[in-house]
Image: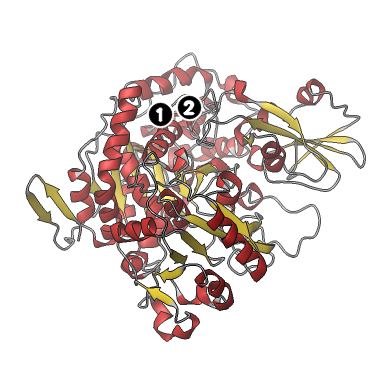
């Protein structure tokens, strides 16, 4: 269990108590008041549509016109039989319709009356809450160990510009930790099990708590039910069910929430923020989309997709999918970047905690061993690992076993190289290594892997290609901290190691977006500005930089080639005939549809294509003979998630 220090006293949390209502809560404030009744000035003629971007609004209003008196709870929300009262309900409670213009003042007034959040510099309250649930042990220890750095970052940002966001209630449900999921992430965290998701959850929880948000936690479906299902009467929710301003889940938790809430799922959709390590591209998110041509290699209707959320509601580990939002994580950096590097070490540390990762790597590692002592942190007690052949690990390797956080950081500081084996893909460890002054050996993946040729990516909702073990490190960091090479070519391996040895040891390095301050800044900006329950333009429209792609090139690549980033929230500004004319593009004809590349110019017959559904506006799509009209933007150095003019 997590140990909580209060002055000179240590309090060890005992076993989780079994109680009827199992939600752990940090300073939950009162729920929001119910919406007022329809103003007398409202006229039903104003509520006849059309409703761009809300395809189900008309159908839902018609359904309520026929059935609204069948449930008392509709009247509790102000429904009185008029179309406008139904649109108010379907916009402010269930999010099927847009807000009425005359109601925007009321909605903004609700938000403005929330008390300002108070940053939390002490962590004891959070540790006590987490300490009552053994599934949070690893997360709790990480937060406790790293809190001095959270404290310093919070203090620095508060001194630069005091936080002004409101305090609100948020819910965190980690589906992967539920007993029903059967993943045993929590139990295996200290035995060599995967840590990437736990790292992200730990750092998200610490950020939200430090920034003053009130948090409800759930690691079981019963807890989730007690958090959300307040009123079981009838087919519509009670007022008190809408107390959260954001609900954080993983994909497993998202499936559990949808199954639990059934017809009420729609009212929670705009509140969702989904931790999604590898990302979800729009073609896998939009249920109605089908490829224009037969595509037997892509299962677009698989179980992990079809959520029809705004793609920005998926939060990723690295900024690899601009259609999604980059959550990231923080990296410990005990050694100051301004301090001189330690004496050169003859140690190398291999990035591979599980035995199967070492298969076929003996020749590669023998080259490393010619120049460095080879160390490892391989576990031996998770799942089927005991049944595997330890002869996969060369005898020259010194294995330390699974280390705690502080011990691992010390070993990284003592090492010159951090040796990638090609897998796992896109984990956090390479950033932790370069932050301690290591050089990361980043094996190239050739041919690149994706869902068409890799079992690992086969069921993931992305067409993204991985061309090295960690593409972010290759693209955004590079030499002298990261060397990307062909690990199958032993001559290239040896030449790479020799080249590293000829260079001075690089100082510790960490991109700002992976620092404590960088993450606090990013979370603040997201929760203040990413509004999916009501229209809100962010990033601001003045950050738009328009570019026309080459035929067959995605907007993601087009923007990247010019030192920009593709911004999907600005695409709607280009999805019209005027944008083509403004950018000097002649359109003999205009076609509308659900294309992966619209807005675009199809060069084969010179027609222009516009997107019919905003959920399909995508940075990722590309097709031969298609030039895409791309919404790019500049970004802050070291903080790709934020534009130059983006406020927190």
Question: In the rendering, at what x and y percent does residue 31 appear?
Answer: 29, 34
Which disc number belongs to residue 85? 2
Residue at the disc numbered 1: 78
Q: Nearer the viewer, residue 201 or 269?
A: 201
Tell me whether the residue at label 1 lies in contact with that at label 2, contact meaning CB atoms closer than 8 angstroms. yes
The residue lying furthest to the top in this view is 41
Q: Nearer the viewer, residue 393 or 571?
A: 393
Quadrant placement of the C terminus: top left
Q: Nearer the viewer, residue 496 or 203?
A: 496
Tell me the residue at 60%/42% (across/down). Answer: 323
Tell me if 353 is positioned left or right of 218 in this view.
Answer: right
Element assignment for label 2: helix
Tell me if 126 is positioned left or right of 34 in this view.
Answer: left
Q: Nearer the viewer, residue 8 or 196?
A: 8
* Residue 272 is at least partly visible in this image: yes
Question: In the rendering, at what x and y percent does residue 151 appear?
Answer: 26, 37
* Residue 488 is at least partly visible in this image: no
Q: How is the image coloured?
A: secondary structure
Q: Alpha-carbon neighbours of circle 2 within 10 Å: few (<14), some, or many (≥20)?
A: many
**Residue 462 falls in image quadrant:** bottom right
Question: In the rendering, at what x and y percent does residue 150 appear?
Answer: 30, 40
Tell me if 277 is positioned left or right of 219 in this view.
Answer: right
Tell me the residue at 44%/40% (across/down). Answer: 271
Q: Alpha-carbon neighbours of circle 1 within 10 Å: few (<14), some, or many (≥20)?
A: some
Tell me the residue at 48%/80% (across/down). Answer: 394
Position above or below: 364 against 532 = below
């Amino acid at each position: 269990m997590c140990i909580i220090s209060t002055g000179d006293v240590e309090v060890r949390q005992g076993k989780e108590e079994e109680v009827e209502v199992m939600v752990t809560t940090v300073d939950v404030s009162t729920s929001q008041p119910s919406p007022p009744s329809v103003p007398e000035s409202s006229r039903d003629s104003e509520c006849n549509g059309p409703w761009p971007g809300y395809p189900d609004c008309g159908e839902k209003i018609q359904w309520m016109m026929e059935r609204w008196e069948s449930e008392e709870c509709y009247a509790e929300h102000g429904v009185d039989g008029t179309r406008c009262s139904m649109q108010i309900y379907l916009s402010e409670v269930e999010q099927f319709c847009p807000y009425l213009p005359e109601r925007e003042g009321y909605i903004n007034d609700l938000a403005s009356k929330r008390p300002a959040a108070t940053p939390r510099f002490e962590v004891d309250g959070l540790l006590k809450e987490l300490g009552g649930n053994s599934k949070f042990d690893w997360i709790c220890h990480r937060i406790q160990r790293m809190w001095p750095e959270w404290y310093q970052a919070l203090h620095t940002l508060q001194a630069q510009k005091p936080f002004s966001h409101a305090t609100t209630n948020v819910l965190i449900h980690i589906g992967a930790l539920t007993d029903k999921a059967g993943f045993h992430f929590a139990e295996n965290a200290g035995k060599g099990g995967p840590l990437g998701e736990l790292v992200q959850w730990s750092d998200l929880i610490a950020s939200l708590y430090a920034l003053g948000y009130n948090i409800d936690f759930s690691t079981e479906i019963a807890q989730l039910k007690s958090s959300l299902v307040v009123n079981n009467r009838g087919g519509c929710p009670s007022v008190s069910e809408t107390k959260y301003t954001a609900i954080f889940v993983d994909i497993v938790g998202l499936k559990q929430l949808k199954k639990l809430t059934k017809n009420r799922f729609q009212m929670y959709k705009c509140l969702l923020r989904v931790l999604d390590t590898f990302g979800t591209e729009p073609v896998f998110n939009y249920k109605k989309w089908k490829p224009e041509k037969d595509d037997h290699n892509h299962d677009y209707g698989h179980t992990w997709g079809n959520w029809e959320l705004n793609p920005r509601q998926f939060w990723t580990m690295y900024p690899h999918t601009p259609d999604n939002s980059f959550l990231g994580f923080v990296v410990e950096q005990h050694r100051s970047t301004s301090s001189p590097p330690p004496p050169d070490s003859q140690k190398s540390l291999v990035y591979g905690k599980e035995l199967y990762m070492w298969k076929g790597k003996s020749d590669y590692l023998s080259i490393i061993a010619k120049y460095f002592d080879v160390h490892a942190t391989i576990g031996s007690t998770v799942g089927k690992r005991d049944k595997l052949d330890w002869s996969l690990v060369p005898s020259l390797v010194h294995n330390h076993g699974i280390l705690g956080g502080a011990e691992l950081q010390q070993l990284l500081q003592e090492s010159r190289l951090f040796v990638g084996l090609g897998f796992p893909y896109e984990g956090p460890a390479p950033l932790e290594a370069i932050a301690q002054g290591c050089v990361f050996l980043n094996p190239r993946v050739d041919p690149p892997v994706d869902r068409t040729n890799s079992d690992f990516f086969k069921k993931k909702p992305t067409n993204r290609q991985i061309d090295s073990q960690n593409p972010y490190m290759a693209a955004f960091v590079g030499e002298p901290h990261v060397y990307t090479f062909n690990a199958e070519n032993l001559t290239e391996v040896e030449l790479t190691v020799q080249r590293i040895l000829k260079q001075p040891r690089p100082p510790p390095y960490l991109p700002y977006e992976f620092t404590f301050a960088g993450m606090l800044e990013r979370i603040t900006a997201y929760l203040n500005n990413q509004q999916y329950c009501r229209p809100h333009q962010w990033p601001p429209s003045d950050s738009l930089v328009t570019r026309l792609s080459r035929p067959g090139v995605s907007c993601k690549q087009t923007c990247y080639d010019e030192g920009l980033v593709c911004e999907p929230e600005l695409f709607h500004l280009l999805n019209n005939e005027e944008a083509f004319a403004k950018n000097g593009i002649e359109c003999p004809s205009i076609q509308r549809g659900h294309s992966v590349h619209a807005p675009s110019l199809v060069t084969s017959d010179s027609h222009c294509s516009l997107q019919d559904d905003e959920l399909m506006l995508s940075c990722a799509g590309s097709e031969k003979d298609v030039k895409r009209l791309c919404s790019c933007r500049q970004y802050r150095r070291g903080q790709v998630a934020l534009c130059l003019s983006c406020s927190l």
